[in-house]
Image (tube, helix red, strand yellow):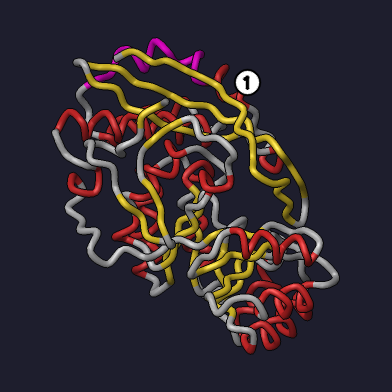
Amino acid sequence: MKIIIRTFKLQLKHTFTISRESHDVQPTLIVELQSDGFSGFGEATSNPYYNITVDSMRANLEAIIPFIESHNDETPEEFWDSASALLKDDMFALCALDMAYNDLYAKKKGKKLYELWGNSPLHNPKTDYTIGIDKIDKMVMKLKEMPWPIYKIKLGTKDDIAIVTELRKHTDARFRIDANCGWTVTETINNAVALKKLGVEFLEQPMKADQWAAHKEVFKHSVLPIVADESCIIEEDVAKCHNHFHGVNVKLVKCGGLTPARRMIAEAKQYGMKTMVGCMTESTVGISAIAHLLPELDYVDMDGALLLSEDIATGVTITDGIVHYADSNGIGAVLK
């Protein structure tokens, strides 16, 4: 098995702002694994919050090329177990590698990835579309620019209720709120009351990740469900989130790929929690991989490629929140 590593700079349509950062360009790393005439693709983006760069991911992957080239016919689970021991300090690089291996493995089996897992897409959830923090008039403009059935609205400002109140005037769509750790306990409980009246479905990660007593307090008193994001990074975190959150948002780059993500989703279901997968601002490679998890989810946020001014890949397409799979096997993504 041969590995090819490429890096790209993805240009965004608009400056994307959350409570802790803004950016116009998103660096990303693409892994291609080649074997027996097939190619599998995987992706992981840089992330300053987790101190991840495309250069650090490349270096960590290049350091284990002999290991990668010596493996070929294992199941994705077996391959992940071996690779994770070598990349335990870089879940992002592990994600790109695992995604590419899953893609390659499914192609060799002549199946789409969800078919290989024995899943049906008949009841897939729709994806939301994200409105980043901006001046209220610009947030309204972004909403009107992309009519959509579900919006994720990034908050964490002093004007959060005013923002949602104004946005509500322009659409009947469902709203989901992501405060990206920007609120306190009191703000979360109080804001939930106002936001529920404005048609908000749930709140995502309103407080800082490690404030477990605060999460417990909000879990008890919030009138809206609370979904963990930054508090649920790796597999061990699912159990911690039980009885502190109503659901978990699993990010592939944070947990190390599709293989551990499926285990996290299954565990969350055992606890009676809602399941969600979220994306980064990434290309259609990463988005196509997420699409195959849809039959296992209650919610999904996979609009990352829609935020780009120019994509680097083809694969799944999304119209009106509905995900359409590519005709090809594996995850269905191909670099342009």
Pick the front one: 39 or 12? 12
Q: Was residue 62 drawn as part of the magenta stretch in this picture?
A: yes
Residue 48 position (above or below residue 213): above
For the point 76% across and 78% down, the residue is 161
The magenta region covers 61-72
Q: In which quarter of the image is residue 56?
A: top right
The x, y position of residue 24, in whole percent, is 71, 39
Residue 114 position (above or below residue 104): below
Q: Can you say which quadrant of the picture contains the N terminus?
A: top left
The x, y position of residue 280, in whole percent, is 56, 46
For the point 38% across and 47% down, the residue is 317
Say which amino acid is labelled 1: Asp
Would you name the residue on which mark 1 appears?
55
Count how many numbered circles sit on residues in the image: 1
Residue 199 position (above or below residue 215): below
Q: Was residue 205 drawn as part of the magenta stretch in this picture?
A: no
In screen coordinates, is 82 left or right of 11? Answer: left
Local secondary structure at mark 1: helix
The x, y position of residue 324, in whole percent, is 31, 52
Q: How crowded is mark 1: few (under 14 residues within 10 Å), some or many (20 or more)?
A: some
In screen coordinates, is 322 left or right of 144? Answer: left
For the point 55% across and 35% down, the residue is 310
